[in-house]
């Protein structure tokens, strides 16, 4: 039976575990035009959440309690036009402050939303990143952080913003540390973080990872990642050939430490070698491959004890996979999907792509995806129209929420990518087990959007232990939220 027939069968009998959660009347709009964008902010302390609908004229906020009771709503004049991206938020006493940056990553500002007073306050911060490169951001409760690297150096900088708008800067100097590039030549930290990507000839982006999201290879194949762990965030770099570099920062104390984890090496047979890693809880999953061999290793991050190691050669059989070798290229929501037969094909493909591994905890243990990804720069139409490309362009409303909402970014990449991969199941001891790959929440949302295409102002966000998918319903002129669980 072909993979496409299996997918259609799966599509028809699948239990979506989907619940209609809430309908929000679109009653603050000032014009007849449909909302062009939507995003959510969840206040885990007060157990509330806000939905913002943008109609290109006003930005309309709706605040709800955890039990779905309306608390407040008001229409604001929108976000300042000089900024192009929302990069984070602080939350305090029911107020939400959104932090913004402009297209060249040098200017920063914020907008405070006060639902009690039904007012907004704009702030422009009095500094520019002239000799620094913006890397990523981190939000935790009533503080917001910006991570940068100083040009021509091995210095990382963290800007801390309080909810009241005050900010300060702390410098972490790693100039006394040795860093190696993909040729194992000494290099600076800024070179590792801002090297031109192999595929796109652009500066390497630092992606944000939330480990509770079902992250696809399109996300995890990036060589520079920031893992969002609440009171900690970890910057990992896999641009070098010998080590994974991990910079762990603890907030709000703002302490930093560097750890290096050695990578298993393949024999030097003259073939280009690709490598990457993924963190989950206390373990690091590392992969190294060329067209002849692959090494997959699981280590305890603290002790570096090897918990699992798999070696694969091009003439061997992939005995640990629970799926065919899938080659999938999607553009505009649909595309070719086929199966490869030979291990040699799999290794040849992933060794010429951006290699990666993704790990998702499941009831049986772990769902592990191993493969490679090629970025598709497409301007999508239909589903998620005008929202993103894999590279993270500006949305239709004039600003982007690409890094503000890692769940939506992860889901969007889940749909729009070109990858070669295998899906595997392992138990808690990392022993391979037989069985069908279980659905996750993103699988179920994807099926729902296929059954209900052409959604407007779509969004996906995490609240409590489930994911929420939102879309505008033109027939009822409301914004509908649906709840999905694994």
Image (spheres, grey):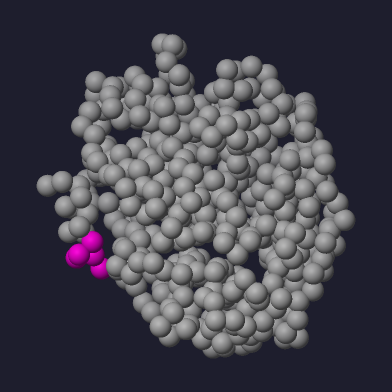
Which secondary structure type mostly characterizes the magenta part of the structure?
Answer: helix
Tell which residue pokes out farthest to the top in this image. 269
Measured as percent of width and height from the top left, residue 428 is found at: 36, 47
Query: What's drawn in magenta, residue-wise?
Result: 11-15
- 48 shown above or below 125: below
Tell which residue pokes out farthest to the left in this image. 1
Q: Is residue 297 visible?
A: no
Please name the residue shown 29% across and 56% down the image.
Answer: 438
Residue 289: quadrant of the picture? top left
Front in this rendered view, residue 282 or 484 = 484
Please name the residue shown 67% across and 25% down the image.
Answer: 179
Left or right of 453? Residue 10 is: left
Front in this rendered view, residue 215 or 78 = 78
Residue 321: quadrant of the picture? top left
Measured as percent of width and height from the top left, residue 301 is found at: 54, 39
Left or right of 370? Residue 386 is: right
Front in this rendered view, residue 340 or 28 = 28
Front in this rendered view, residue 215 or 334 = 334
Asked whether 465 falls inside the magenta stretch, the response is no
Please name the residue shown 41% across and 69% down the image.
Answer: 455
- 393 shown above or below 193: below
């Amino acid at each position: 039976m072909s993979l496409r027939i299996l997918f259609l069968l799966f599509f028809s009998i699948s239990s979506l575990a989907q619940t209609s959660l809430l309908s929000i009347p679109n009653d603050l709009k000032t014009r007849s035009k449909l909302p062009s964008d939507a995003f959510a902010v969840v206040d885990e302390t007060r157990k509330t959440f806000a939905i913002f609908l943008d109609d290109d004229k006003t930005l309309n906020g709706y605040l709800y309690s955890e039990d779905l009771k309306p608390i407040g709503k008001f229409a604001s004049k929108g976000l300042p036009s000089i900024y192009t991206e929302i990069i984070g938020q602080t939350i305090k006493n029911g107020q939400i402050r959104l932090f913004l940056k402009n297209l060249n990553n040098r200017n920063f500002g914020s907008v405070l939303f006060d639902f009690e007073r039904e007012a907004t306050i704009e702030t422009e911060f009095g500094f520019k990143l002239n000799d620094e490169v913006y890397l990523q951001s981190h939000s935790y409760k009533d503080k917001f952080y910006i991570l940068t690297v100083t040009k021509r150096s091995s210095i990382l900088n963290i800007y801390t913003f309080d909810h009241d708008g005050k900010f300060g800067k702390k410098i972490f100097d790693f100039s006394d540390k040795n860093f190696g590039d993909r040729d194992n030549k000494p290099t600076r930290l800024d070179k590792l973080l801002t090297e031109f990507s192999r595929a796109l000839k652009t500066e390497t982006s630092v992606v944000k990872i939330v480990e509770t999201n079902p992250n696809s290879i399109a996300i995890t194949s990036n060589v520079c990642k920031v893992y969002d762990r609440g009171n900690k965030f970890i910057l990992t770099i896999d641009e070098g050939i010998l080590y994974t570099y991990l910079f762990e920062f603890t907030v709000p104390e703002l302490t930093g430490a560097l750890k290096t984890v050695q990578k298993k090496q393949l024999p030097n047979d003259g073939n280009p070698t690709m490598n990457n890693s993924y963190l989950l809880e206390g373990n690091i999953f590392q992969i190294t491959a060329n067209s002849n061999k692959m090494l997959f290793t699981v280590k305890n991050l603290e002790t570096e004890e090897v918990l699992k190691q798999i070696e694969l050669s091009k003439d061997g059989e992939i005995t640990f996979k629970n799926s065919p070798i899938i080659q999938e290229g999607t553009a505009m929501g649909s595309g070719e999907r086929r199966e490869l037969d030979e291990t040699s094909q799999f290794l040849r493909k992933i060794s010429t792509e951006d290699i990666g591994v993704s790990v998702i905890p499941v009831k049986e243990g772990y769902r592990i995806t191993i493969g490679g990804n090629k970025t598709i720069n497409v301007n999508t139409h239909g589903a998620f129209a005008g929202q993103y490309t894999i590279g993270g362009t500006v949305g239709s409303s004039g600003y982007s929420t690409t890094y503000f909402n890692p769940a939506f970014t992860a889901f969007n990449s889940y749909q729009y990518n070109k990858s070669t991969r295998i899906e595997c199941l392992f138990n808690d001891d990392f022993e391979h087990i037989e069985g069908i790959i279980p659905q996750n929440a993103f699988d179920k949302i994807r099926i729902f959007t296929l059954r209900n295409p052409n959604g407007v102002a779509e969004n996906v966000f995490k609240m409590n232990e489930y994911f929420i998918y939102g879309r505008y319903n033109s027939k009822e002129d409301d914004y509908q939220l649906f709840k999905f669980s694994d």
